[in-house]
Amino acid sequence: MFKTLKNALKVKEIRNGIIYTFLMIVVVRIGCQIPIPGTDADVIAQITEQFSGGAFGFFDAMTGGSFSEMSIFALNITPYITASIIIQLLTIAIPKLEEMQKDGEDGRKKIQKITRFVTVALAIIEGTAMAIGFGNQGVFGATSSMSTAEYAGVITVAVITMTAGSALVMWIGERITEKGVGNGISIVLLVNIISRIPSDIINLFDKFVKGASSIGGSVLAAVVIIAIIVFVVAFVVILQDGQRKIAVQYSKKMQGRKMVGGQTSHIPLKVNTAGVIPVIFAQSLLQFPVVIGSFFKQSNAEWTKYLSSQYWANPDALKYSIGLLAYILLVLFFAYFYTSITFNPVEVANNMKKQGGFIPGIRPGKPTSTYLQTILNYVIFIGAAGLILVAITPIIFSGVFSASVSFGGTSLIIIVGVVIETLKNIESKMVVRNYKGFLTD
């Protein structure tokens, strides 16, 4: 990794892209510290403290702490991520969107434009819900003493600020993709998550290392914490890079007087085909009722504890771990569901047949699609099992030892995935540059 970055910095074009990306990241982090006009910092701290390990914990990590600070970037990149997932799912249900997706660069631009509009719409909806919900809890002062016009004005300013902030972060992400290195949206999300890690490490150090009763206990605690983090990171790297290669043979055919074809290729089926999407879907589905309940001052109700990860795997209250079982089943379900709509074995089999390709030992057509579906089911299960292991390890650690951290398994999957993707992007640019140099020479 370091060798790749060192070589990349020697190339002016890539070096300028890295500098541009860094400057845009600085702008995002500055925006995460600027509060929404009219908010009370002390009240915000009191209100958001109750969500540090609950329904808003992962959301706050994705926004880089801007949510808990109620900054102008409080929504950050989350509306864009949600909009992208919605549009991706709708491409299966709406034929027009599916045609756009297959229409090359022009279709991609049209879908990107639609995604922007959906992002702004979601930002308005989420901003309104947050402004009203937290406004009723005193974030903007005593709203009960305000007139209707004053209250409407405060809420409107907050909604416009959060929507504009989310749109600006989306614009910055797209500019990074265009002029920087890697996928801009992913890099913004990566930096947001990483920004929360130092404080979490300090909390773990204070609780287990510094708070140990003896020097031996401190050393043991430090070793265990480091070992768990290294194990999870290594496992995530293996999970993200793992794939099942299905050999494909293309038959020879005559073109003019020459015999062409006969190549051997493969279909790469990633072990973690759905990425982090199943975990995000499962968390969102379980936390949505808790979020709504918190706006109606139900955040400490008994029923919310079954849906909040901070109460799971607690030896003193195992009944709440029913929510953990539901979470595992939802991750498994969404892993199959999301993969089924993004990888179509029938379509792949038909394309192979048209191009004269076949899987050795398998007849073209329906037998090929059936074979692909069978292999895919096994691969999805293995990937989902690995995803569940990564996702619940921090939850169990938190429940047993009461150590709440924001960089859970989901965050680590995002971090590793984005780092690998960015490095591959840099390497591809270096390869393209070398080819250009070879051709011009």
Image (spheres, rainbow, N blue to C red):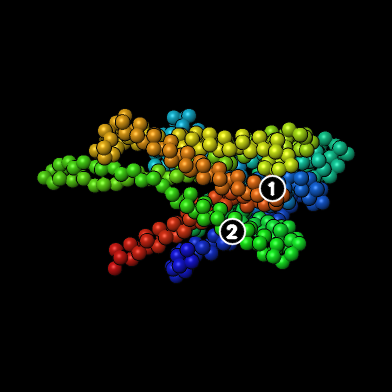
Q: Nearer the viewer, residue 165 or 89?
A: 89
Coordinates of residue 252 in the picture (x, y in percent):
18, 42
Q: Which residue is mark 1?
A: 400
Q: Nearer the viewer, residue 10 or 109?
A: 10
In the image, what residue occupies the spot 36% across and 46% down?
A: 245
Q: Is residue 339 above or below residue 231?
A: above
In the image, what residue occupies the spot 47% across and 59% down?
A: 423
Task: Point out which mark residue 32 bears.
Answer: none
Residue 314 visible? The answer is: yes
The mark that comes first in sequence, 2 or 1, is: 2
Coordinates of residue 26 in the picture (x, y in percent):
62, 60
Q: Residue furthest right?
A: 145
**Which quarter of the image is occupied by the C terminus?**
bottom left
Q: Which residue is mark 2?
A: 227
In the image, what residue occupies the spot 69% across and 33% down?
A: 289
Q: Residues within 10 Å of mark 2 (few under 14, many from 20)?
A: few
In the image, what residue occupies the spot 43% across and 49% down?
A: 242
Coordinates of residue 398 in the picture (x, y in percent):
68, 48
Residue flagged by tag 2: what amino acid is it? Answer: Ala
Secondary element at image label 1: helix
On screen, residue 264 versus residue 67, left or right, reads left
Residue 287 visible? The answer is: no
Secondary element at image label 2: helix
Q: Nearer the viewer, residue 280 or 332?
A: 332
